[in-house]
Amino acid sequence: MEGKKKIYKIEEGRKICGVCGGVAEYFNIDPVLVRVIWGVLALGCGIGIVLYFVCAFVFPNKSEVEY
């Protein structure tokens, strides 16, 4: 299945675990926008913190993803 997008954590340019950068690449948007949205979720109701660390453990690194 060529052309199928896969989500992953970035390794180059990451701030904490690379989740926001990977999500930004997946949706083809600016990583700063993803970080701001994630921050609002974290400060607003706390779900952003839990979701971030779940993704950090579940998502593979970019170097581990086969294309």
Image (tube, helix red, strand yellow):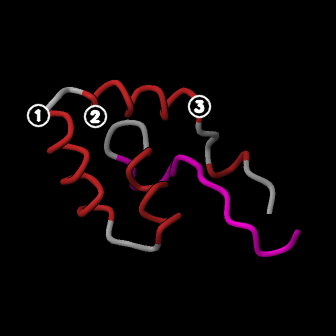
Residue 66 position within the rendered picture, expressed as x and y whole percent measured from the top left = 80, 55
Residue drawn at point x = 25 percent, y = 45 percent:
38
Give the SS element for disc 3. helix
The kind of residue tagged 3 is: Val
Residue 44 position within the rendered picture, expressed as x and y whole percent measured from the top left = 11, 35
| Measured Cα–Cα span from mark 3 to mark 2 | 15 Å
| Measured Cα–Cα span from mark 2 to mark 1 | 8 Å
Residue drawn at point x = 19 percent, y = 34 percent:
42
Q: Is residue 49 shown left or right of residue 13?
A: left
Residue drawn at point x = 32 percent, y = 62 percent:
31
Of 47 and 9, the residue lying toward us: 47
13 inside magenta stretch: yes
Residue drawn at point x = 38 percent, y = 31 percent:
51
Above or below residue 57? Residue 59 is below
Asked if the residue under mark 1 is in contact with the one under mark 2, i.e. CB atoms within 8 Å, the reply is yes
The numbered mark at residue 58 is 3
Q: Quadrant of the N terminus?
A: bottom right
10 inside magenta stretch: yes
Asked if the residue under mark 2 is in contact with the one under mark 3, i.e. CB atoms within 8 Å, the reply is no
Which residue bears the numbered disc 1? 43
Q: Which residue extends farthest left? A: 44
The kind of residue tagged 2 is: Gly
Which residue bears the numbered disc 2? 48
Q: Quadrant of the C terminus?
A: bottom right
Find the magenta span and give its range: 1-14
Label 3, residues with CA under 10 Å away: few <14, some 14-19, many ≥20: few
Above or below residue 16? Residue 21 is below
| Measured Cα–Cα span from mark 3 to mark 1 | 22 Å
The kind of residue tagged 1 is: Leu
Q: Quadrant of residue 41?
A: top left
